[in-house]
Amino acid sequence: MLPAETIAEITSNLAALNLQPNTAAQILAAVLMPLLKISDPAPDPDLDRKRRRKRAGRPRGRSRAAPRQRRKYKRHAPTEAHDRAIAALRANPEATPTEVAKLAKVSRSTAANAAKHLAREARRKSRATRKTSKTDPKTERRSRAQRFLRETLAQGPKEVQAVEAAAAKAHVDLVTLEQARGDLGVIATRANTGGVHAVQWALPG
């Protein structure tokens, strides 16, 4: 921009010429406009470039951090030291990890891992045994009927009616009682009790 003093001096010089207003205005426009353009500093391309770089360097906002992924640990195959520790533990089940480490000539951590391995195996076998040991309800009833017959006939032969009455009290049904009788090989005989040939059951032998 031109200084105010320079503009005032140009205006007063034009006024001293006693020109027509239109002419004075035209001269002012013709003289002042180019001077005003020249006086405006040209934009500095380097400065503009610096400003753009500065704006580009500013962080636009916090980006959401990606969720951390859990590290997947690979299970290593049992080593020779691990096998030695397992063998030492099986031979000395009451030994401590330190004693096993000395016996198998391995580190204490290897001995401890071997102990954990054997404990897991024992738990798996225990669960498998519990699953297989669960018997069918029918088989359980039959076994209970067999126990009942052994206990009832242990003192000698008894009349069938008395056995059946005792079975009803013990919640053993007649069908299961007959099956248990066949399983145990219970012998049926006729005995003369008071003139009546009553049927008796007795255990074999």
Image: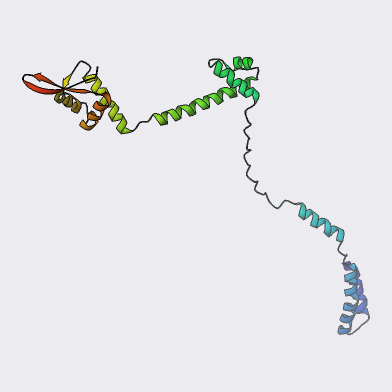
Looking at the picture, the colour scheme in use is rainbow
Q: Is residue 31 above or below residue 71?
A: below
Q: Left or right: where does residue 76 sit relative to residue 51? A: left
Q: Quadrant of residue 150?
A: top left
Residue beneath the point at 59% across and 24% down: 113
- The one nearer the camera, 24 or 174, is 174
- The one nearer the camera, 193 or 96, is 193
Q: Is residue 200 above or below residue 35?
A: above
Residue beneath the point at 91% across and 76% down: 31
Q: Left or right: where does residue 93 sit relative to residue 193? A: right
Q: Quadrant of residue 33?
A: bottom right
Residue beneath the point at 64% across and 46% down: 66
Q: Is residue 185 above or below residue 3?
A: above
Please identify the quadrant where the C terminus is shown.
Answer: top left
View extreme (left): residue: 195
Q: Position of residue 118 (x, y in %)?
A: 54, 24
Q: Quadrant of residue 87?
A: top right
Q: Left or right: where does residue 65 sit relative to residue 49? A: left
Please identify the quadrant where the N terminus is shown.
Answer: bottom right
- The one nearer the camera, 10 or 42, is 42
> What number of labels is visible?
0
Q: Position of residue 190 (x, y in %)?
A: 13, 22
Q: Position of residue 90 (x, y in %)?
A: 55, 19
